[in-house]
Every structure is written in structure tokens, then in C-alpha cells.
Image: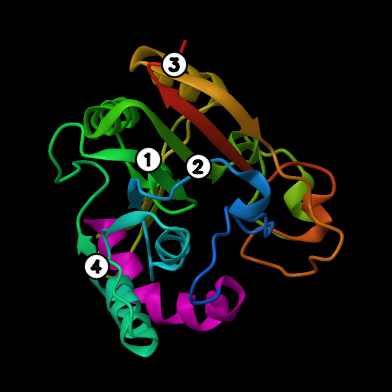
Amino acid sequence: MANRADWDAYADEYQSTHGEYLGDSGFLWGPEGVREDEVLALGEVAGKDVLEIGCGAGQCSRWVLEHGGRPVGIDVSGRQLQHSRRIDEERGVVVPALCASAARLPFGDQTFDVVFSAFGALQFVADASALVADVARVLRPDGVFAFSITHPTRWMFLDDPGEEGLVASQSYWDRTPYVEVDDVTGETRYVEHHRTLGDWVGTLARNGFVITDLHEPEWPADNDRTWGGWSRVRGVLTPGSAIFVTTLGAV
């Protein structure tokens, strides 16, 4: 609930700041600017049912649609989805989307061939095991689950794009959630959860997924953009994102 309110409040600024970089229809896996056309994490999407978790304004889902897939997006923020509808109206092509939480996917068993989340939702969900189990439930056999997250090693460092963000300040194994509280009301405004690489590997394995690739994108030579705590200063020395590519029930 806290993250929903936070994203509703931040959505306009987010789209104003990053919308041109993201494009109306493009598939970026994270602030580094690595695209699905390069990573090919989803494989062939033409003719497949594809779920995007944390779709925002639907840019990645539009990419799927343009490549012949049948996308559906979900996002916890109604305001983000209003931006998605705005782009739908401007382009004259509708990408189906609904307001729902990644913590409980509102779909039947074996509904999708591909599920993905491009830097959108997974670190905001408290119970990673329940989330991954739910993804397994809605995926068909041999389905693909791909997602990008803040690289777990970044948990050790301050969220600062400058040199101060290169100094380790806390334990990598400290899984205490990061919480922001409103100074006036005392209400929780934002919550983000940390899992180590080993946590993710174990959770995926216990729910029937086989990791087929793990990308740790290097900072591109032509990217001078600062995005929150992501920057060239940090990106040339340490990974900022991790992209997991998995298959359900693969051998």
C-alpha cells in the first residue's frame, strides 16, 4: 500500500524525467540502457501470451506487441497506468493493463508463456518465495521468467551516483528492508526489500525454475545519463543491475 501511494505521487515526475529515454515503445532492462534486442532474454515472443509485472506506462509491453506477442501488463500504480492509457490514445493501439499487485497475480493457472519484469516490481514485494511460486503457477510448462533488479551487491553502498556511492556502508547480508517514513504523519511511504544473489537462486530453484542466464550489464560507453543512484562513475566499476533469465521445468 505504501509503495502504491509513493508511485502514484511519483508517476508524473518519473514519466517526465525518463519518458523520452524509455520511448513510447521500447524495452530497456534498466538504467544502463541495455535493450531486449541485445539481451534476447525473452526469446521469440511472436504468438505468445506475455505478462509484464510492473509495466508502468507500458513501454516494454508495446515492444512485445510490435514483435507479435499478446502482452498484458499489471502495475500497482493507477497513475502509471493512466500514462499507459495516454500513450495508447496517442498511438491508437491499446496494450491491455490492469491495476494489480505483483504479490498476488490475478490470473488463472498456466495462462502465460512468458512472464517478465523490467526493473519494475520485484524488490517491492515482501515475500519473494510467494511471488516466484505465483509466477510458476501462471506460467505454462517450459515458460520463461525473466526479470531485472537492482544488483544485490548495491545494497552495501549508499544510493549516491557520485564517489560516495562507491564506499561500502553496510553488510551485504543485512536483509533489513529499506523503509521511508513521512516526517509529519509517521506513515510508511516507501519500502524496498533486499535479497542476495544466493537468495534469488535458491528461491527460483525451489519453485521449479532453472537459471539459463544471468546478465550483469557493464556501463555502455555512450551512456552519460544519471538515473537516481546509477551513473557512469559507479557503473564502470561495479554492476548496478542484474537480469535473471529462467525457464520453468527445464532440464
Q: Give residue 27's position: percent from left, percent from top.
A: 54, 60
Q: Is residue 202 above or below residue 127?
A: above
User: In the rendered image, which residue does mark 2 sit on?
Assistant: 42
Mark yes or no: residue 172 visible: no
User: In the rendered image, which residue does mark 3 sit on?
Assistant: 250
Q: Amino acid at mark 1?
A: Val
Query: What is the spatial separation of the Cα atoms under label 2 and label 1, in whole angstroms?
Result: 7 Å
Q: Amino acid at mark 3?
A: Ala
Say which residue appears at 84% left-offset and 44% top-offset.
237
Query: What is the spatial separation of the Cα atoms under label 2 and label 3, in whole angstroms?
Result: 15 Å
Mark yes or no: residue 87 visible: yes
Q: Secondary structure at mark 4?
A: loop
Q: Amino acid at mark 2?
A: Leu
At label 1, counting other C-alpha atoms closer than 10 Å, the crowd grade (few under 14, some 14-19, many 20 or more) is: many
Q: Give residue 236's position: percent from left, percent from top.
A: 84, 49
User: In the rendered image, which residue does mark 4 sit on?
Assistant: 185
Q: Earlier in the sequence, mark 1 or mark 4?
A: 1
Q: Is residue 35 above or below residue 122?
A: below
Q: Earlier in the sequence, mark 2 or mark 3?
A: 2
Q: Amino acid at mark 4?
A: Thr
In-front residue for pair 56/234: 56
Q: Give residue 108's position: percent from left, percent from top.
A: 12, 38
User: In the rendered image, which residue does mark 1 sit on?
Assistant: 114
Mark 1 and 3 residues: CB-CB less than 8 Å, in contact? no
In-front residue for pair 49/103: 49
Q: Earlier in the sequence, mark 2 or mark 1?
A: 2
At label 2, counting other C-alpha atoms closer than 10 Å, the crowd grade (few under 14, some 14-19, many 20 or more) is: many
Q: Is residue 143 above or below residue 190?
A: above
Q: Secondary structure at mark 2?
A: loop
Query: What is the spatial separation of the Cα atoms under label 4 and label 2, in whole angstroms?
Result: 43 Å
Mark 2 and 1 residues: CB-CB less than 8 Å, in contact? yes
Answer with the quarter of the image where residue 151 lies. top right
